[in-house]
Image (tube, grey):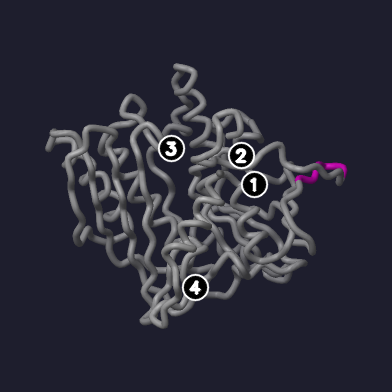
């Protein structure tokens, strides 16, 4: 059973509908009446991070930034964080993690308002709940044929850091920074939503190809990605595969009408975030890659899947 199937089964068990909920499972966050947007993100030692790679404070910052990224993908403004920690009998470790999460909150002007703590024989676990607010949200289901596909920033840096560490090497400093301190795209997400520019949006946590596929499935369309247009992070050494399949960049991928291109580029300059059109939405299903000659091919693989066999990741 892969991760997607497990999630479907868990949703079937837990979600029975509610009049209080405007948008339930299946997107980056839930949206409840009153405009409250809620998401949760789990960080597990040995799966999402290792302490021989980054410090406890950096692990906490990373967990907080990842949770807030879900709000960015919905176009929501952040309001609060809740943090639950499971750690060995070492109070200093819990405090360092909490300081890291607080740093992610301080960056966007929100506080930690509660949480929980438990002793764990290992591994360390940090679960961060991000709470925001939005009068309307951008979901994964608004992509339509003819729209452009865009990404913010550059991709592959975090995956390049993991690849270097996994081979007992030292990553490029920029790649390390991208892994330890994911970018804040909340102002961008809010602007794209507020101006009605983004019609579908997602944060890139499991890899561009995998997350583009999620948008395509939610919208009932196909996504064409032009590989030559994908911006590769400088720390990834020009490796397009890291940009396509590596995860945890926490950049935004969104679709927008073709007529909005000039305004999107101008908005990127206003918020100091490069925005790149990397493809288009078409009728059909699935994700295809297109080379400089217009030749198409299926992606070599999907993105990160927690329940796939190691050889399939």
**Residue 154 at what x, y percent from top left?**
57, 44
Residue at 13%, 33% in the rendered image: 90
Q: Main secondary structure of the magenta part?
A: loop
The residue mark sitting in front, 1 or 3, is: 1
- Per the model, the C-alpha gap separating discs 2 and 3 is 15 Å
Return the disc, 1 or 3, that comes first in the chain's sequence. 3
In the rendered structure, which segment of residues is drawn in magenta? 289-293
Return the disc, 1 or 2, that comes first in the chain's sequence. 1
Q: Are marks 1 and 3 in contact (CB under 8 Å)?
A: no
- Per the model, the C-alpha gap separating discs 4 and 1 is 23 Å
Q: Are marks 1 and 2 in contact (CB under 8 Å)?
A: yes
Callout 3 secondary element: helix
Q: Look at mark 2 in the image and give the residue it sits on.
A: 245
Q: Nearer the viewer, residue 67 or 214?
A: 214
**Residue 52 at what x, y percent from top left?**
33, 24
Q: Nearer the viewer, residue 291 or 83?
A: 83
Q: Look at mark 3 in the image and give the residue it sits on.
A: 179
Return the disc, 4 or 1, that comes first in the chain's sequence. 4
Q: Are marks 4 and 3 in contact (CB under 8 Å)?
A: no
- Per the model, the C-alpha gap separating discs 1 and 3 is 19 Å
Q: Look at mark 1 in the image and give the residue it sits on.
A: 209
> Residue 160 vs residue 35: left or right?
right
Dot 4 crowding, Cα within 10 Å, few <14, some 14–19, many 20+: many
Instruction: Report the disc number at residue 137.
Output: 4
């Amino acid at each position: 059973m892969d991760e997607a199937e497990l999630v479907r089964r868990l949703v079937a068990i837990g979600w029975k509908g509610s009049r209080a909920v405007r948008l339930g499972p299946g997107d980056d966050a839930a949206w409840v009446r009153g405009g409250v947007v809620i998401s949760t993100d789990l960080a597990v030692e040995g799966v999402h991070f290792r302490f021989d790679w980054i410090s406890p404070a950096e692990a906490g910052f990373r967990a907080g930034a990842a949770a807030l990224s879900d709000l960015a993908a919905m176009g929501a403004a952040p309001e609060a964080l809740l943090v639950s920690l499971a750690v060995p009998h070492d109070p200093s470790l819990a405090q360092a993690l909490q300081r890291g999460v607080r740093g992610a909150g301080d960056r966007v002007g929100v506080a930690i308002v509660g949480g929980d703590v438990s002793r764990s024989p290992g591994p360390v676990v940090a679960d961060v709940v991000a709470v925001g607010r939005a009068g309307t949200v951008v979901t994964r289901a608004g992509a339509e044929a003819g729209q452009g596909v865009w990404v913010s920033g550059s991709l592959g840096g975090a995956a390049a850091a993991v690849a270097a560490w996994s081979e007992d090497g030292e990553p490029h400093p920029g790649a390390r920074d991208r892994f330890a301190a994911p970018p804040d795209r909340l102002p961008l997400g809010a602007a794209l939503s507020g101006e009605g520019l983004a019609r579908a949006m997602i944060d890139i946590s499991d890899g561009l190809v995998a997350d583009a596929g999620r948008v395509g499935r939610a919208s009932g369309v196909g996504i064409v990605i032009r590989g030559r247009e994908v911006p590769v992070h400088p720390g990834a050494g020009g490796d397009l595969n890291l940009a396509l399949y590596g995860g945890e960049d926490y950049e935004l991928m969104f679709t927008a009408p073709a007529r909005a291109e000039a305004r999107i580029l101008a908005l990127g300059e206003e918020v100091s975030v490069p925005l790149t059109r990397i493809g288009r939405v078409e009728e059909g299903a699935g994700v295809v890659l297109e080379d400089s000659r217009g030749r198409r091919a299926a992606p070599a693989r999907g993105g990160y899947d927690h329940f796939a066999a190691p050889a399939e990741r």
